[in-house]
Image: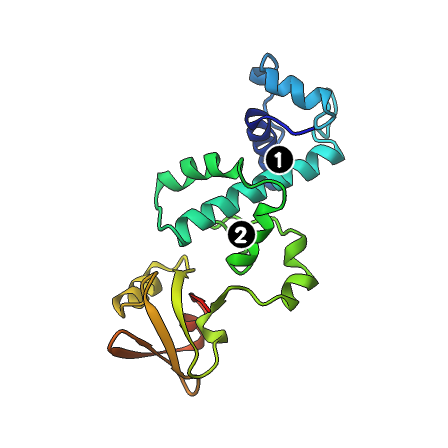
Amino acid sequence: MQLTDRAEEILEKIWVETMERKKVPDTVLLLDDPAFSELTKGGYILLGSKKILTNKGEEEGKQCVRRHRLAERLLSDVFQIKGANVHEAGCKLEHALKRGLEDRICTLLGHPRTCPHGTPIPPGKCCGKGARELKSLIAPLSDLKKGQKGKIAYIQTTDRSMLRKIMAMGALPGSNVKLIERFPSYVFEVGESQFAVDRGAAAKIHVWV
């Protein structure tokens, strides 16, 4: 049975409270919500139990959180949507990422580990051994071969100082880039200019290859 959007939102909230924050969620205000009843009848939550989420609810809640955070990652990194708009738009987009679409997006983005706010993205099946064997459409600049070209997809870092430094070089999403050298520094070309960075910075620049 496919859950309604509202039921997914409630399940996601309960999962975050119980699994990540290790708190007991306050469900009193939700008792009259039809979506809450949908979750109890569907066997996702169990009232009166110390462990509110059933095994079924725990797994589905994890998938809801995964879809939401992947949606935020996609909106932030590829479409450059920032601030509060990321969360709001992510809430709407997550409900469309069903039936395997979230794994395709995860692979496309190179299996990111955190959302734009720094919270972990629960891994999916695509993040296992099969994913490591599958070449992603997007790879860190540090993984490119000498002479390889691509287009910058996004910069993945929570270090604002590093982000400003990289962007000041003109390494912006949508820019064409070519890796010139890998040693002793990563030298890359953007436009008519060349820049040298260490491996740490090169790993933050993700490129469509």
In the displayed structure, would residue 206 be above or below residue 65? below
Q: Earlier in the sequence, mark 2 or mark 1?
A: 1
* Residue 15 numbered mark, or none: 1
**Which one is nearer the viewer's eye here, 159 or 60?**
60
Q: Which residue is rendered at x = 44% and y = 76% of the image? A: 199
Q: Position of residue 20 (x, y in %)?
A: 60, 41
Q: Which residue is rendered at x = 62% and y = 52% of the image? A: 123
Disc 2 element: helix
**Which one is nearer the viewer's eye here, 169 or 152?**
152
In the displayed structure, would residue 208 be above or below residue 94? below
* Image quarter (top left, top right, bottom left or bottom right) of the N terminus: top right
The amino acid type found where label 1 is placed reads Trp
Res. 179 visible in picture: yes
CA–CA distance in space, label 2 to label 1: 22 Å
In the displayed structure, would residue 123 be above or below residue 180? above
Q: What residue did someone put label 2 on?
A: 105
The amino acid type found where label 2 is placed reads Ile
Position of 101 with respect to 45 (left or right) is left
